[in-house]
Image (spheres, grey):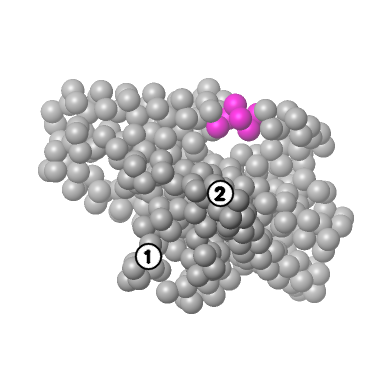
Amino acid sequence: LALVLFLPPMLVDGAFYTPLARFRRQLPGILSLAVGAVIFTTLAVGVVTHWFMPELPWVACFALGAIVSPPDAVSARAVLKGVKLPRRMTTLLEGESLLNDATGLILFRFAVAATLSGVFNAGEALQGFAVLAIGGVLVGTVMGAAWVFVVRKLKDHMLIILASVLLSWVAYLAGEAVHVSGVIATVTAGLVQGWRQHTVLPAAVRLPTSSVNRIIGFVLEALVFILIGFSLRGVIERVGETGGVSAALIVTVLGVVAAVAVARFVWIFGSDWLLKLARTIGIKRARPMGWRQATVMSWAGMRGVVTLAITLTLPLNMPGRDMMLVCAFAVIFATVVIQGSSLG
């Protein structure tokens, strides 16, 4: 319920304003951040968590990694609104925010299923990942095309606004109904909606639709933080019954926060070094960012509402559930307060 209610409108919000030409041009870099960096961070956090808490199953550690791995690039854009950024960096941040949630959520589901069942097959997981991703793109494209067809037939402005707002939930539920990635289906439908809005919607409809979407996004984000507060209250009460916060929990939380930040720096600077190497051997298409842009990209790794929404879906019988809730909130708090306040 948490994923169905909160995720779709947040995903479409970013997709709706993504320019097609720049998105295509920077797609390799976007995929490197949205898929490669998320998987690398998931593995790094899983290893660090198991190091501090060896009694926790490996797959449960990787489930925590999947929860905290997707950055909220929307937060970075909000912080940097008053700063003039290179267009390439802006496109990379926006594109990353669209696709990284899908990667993190798919990894999270595999990890939770493996933890509860005790069975994990890497080959089947990789094949399932591909099926979920490709199927999600196909379903999202169909839903986006259906939206274009419907709004062209509608004459009433209120019905057009309603159809536009409901597209995110319809695409997500359609993807889940056919057992593919509802997140990728929603993002794809949002991209189609954003790319076709000027040809099918008059300005008199686009403006109020944008206002409605902003209000819905604000209300749902506020509700996510309220719900995580209720969840943390239960954690605090259970910790109090056991005699207070243990030193092991504090060390684990600090280790996870550090692993999240360091893993992003390692991935981005490592990728930029490979691009420099490719450039020196004559590959002209390789365009390294340089250490200045790489530093800003690395520091723009704030976690946000999506991490909270995924955390709320943890099963009650998940090993280390309380620790995961605390870690997720700590990662969001640390990245938003420390990185967010200093990024500009």
Front residue of 9 and 81: 81
First in sequence: mark 1 vs mark 2: 1
Quadrant showing the C terminus: bottom left
Give the left or right position of residue 263, taking residue 46 as reference: left
Please identify the dominant SS of the magenta region: helix
At horizontal 19% and vertical 32% (from top left) the residue drawn is 200
Q: Is residue 158 visible?
A: no
Front residue of 110 and 309: 110
Circle 1 is placed at which residue position? 85
State whether residue 228 is above or below residue 120: below
* Furthest residue toward front: 282
> Judging from the image, what secondary structure is the residue with disc 1 in?
loop
> What is the total number of numbered labels drawn onto the structure image?
2
Quadrant in the rendering for residue 266: bottom right
> Judging from the image, what secondary structure is the residue with disc 2 in?
loop
Q: Is residue 13 magenta?
A: no
Q: Which residues are magenta?
A: 128-133
At horizontal 50% and vertical 48% (from top left) the residue drawn is 284
